[in-house]
Amino acid sequence: MDVQLLIIFVLLALLAEVLGTVGGFGSSLFFVPIAGYFFDFHSVLGITALFHLSSNITKIALFRQGIDKQLILYMGIPAIVTVAIGAWVSRYANSHFLELALAVFLTLFSSLLLLFRSYSISPRPSNAVRGGLVSGFVAGLLGTGGAIRGIVLSAFQLKMQVFIATSAVIDLGIDFSRSVVYGLNGYIHSSDLYLIPPLFGASLAGTYIGKRILTRVSEDGFRSIVLVLILGVGLFTLIRYLY
């Protein structure tokens, strides 16, 4: 990648990190389609996992007061298990069909939650486990499960700090697990490792900017932002797939 393309790529990664922080569910939802314009699908999975590791460490440091240990236990452990399964299955899956299915799901559910604002799901262990299982598997399979987790956490109607910090801790475990499997699959290439320092800088700056933006956002406004961003990504993916 030449210098000009690298600068564009890093700036887009910075934007993805800002949006992922403001949306509370991580940058991979935005970063994966961005990286897809520069790299092949399997390389995108490897690069996303490495980028997300630094991204989530930064979020945990900045939002650590909101960590919900019980939710991490019930949602995080199932996600860490199924992300490894999804990462392994990614070698054989039809990524285009799966992206379409995910886009339809995100569009429908985010629309429903926006229309029925008072709807909520109890964050009891059984619901958290199911959300973790699905979001982890999708994260391993497609490189991004944050939107699924975002839908679940939004339905739980968690406070902003709890939402972001808890999601980041779960995501950190997911990223570590899938990075190992992606490495074994050959998705992490030595020729791409030069991207780590600039992407690490983008994750630091993007998380900080996102946190500053959130200081001006109410709890209800935050939930709306989460759902609107998820809806936007779902619609964008559908349009890209159809045209």
Image (spheres, rainbow, N blue to C red):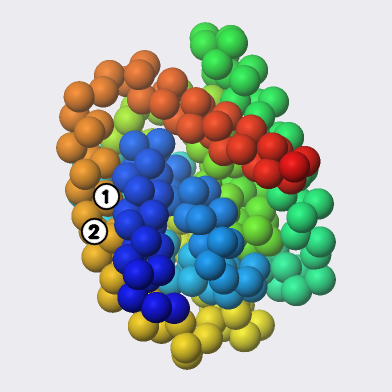
Residue at the location (21% across, 44% down)?
209
At label 2, counting other C-alpha atoms closer than 10 Å, the crowd grade (few under 14, some 14-19, many 20 or more) is some
- From the viewer's perspective, is residue 96 above or below residue 164? below
State the mark number for residue 197: none
236 or 212: nearer the viewer: 236
Q: Are marks 2 and 1 in contact (CB under 8 Å)?
A: yes
Q: Which residue is mark 1?
A: 207
Q: Amino acid at mark 2?
A: Leu
Q: Is residue 28 visible?
A: no
Q: Is residue 221 visible?
A: yes
Q: Does dot 1 land on a helix, a strand or a loop?
A: helix
Q: In this orientation, which residue lies closer to the viewer: 180 or 203?
A: 203
Q: Is residue 30 left or right of residue 81?
A: left
Farthest residue, direction bottom: 190
Three-letter residue code for mark 1: Thr
Q: Left or right: 113 with respect to 26?
A: right
Spatial CA distance of label 2 from label 1 is 5 Å
Sort mark 1 into few (<14), some (14-19) or many (20+) by Cα contacts within 10 Å: many
Mark 2 lies on residue: 204
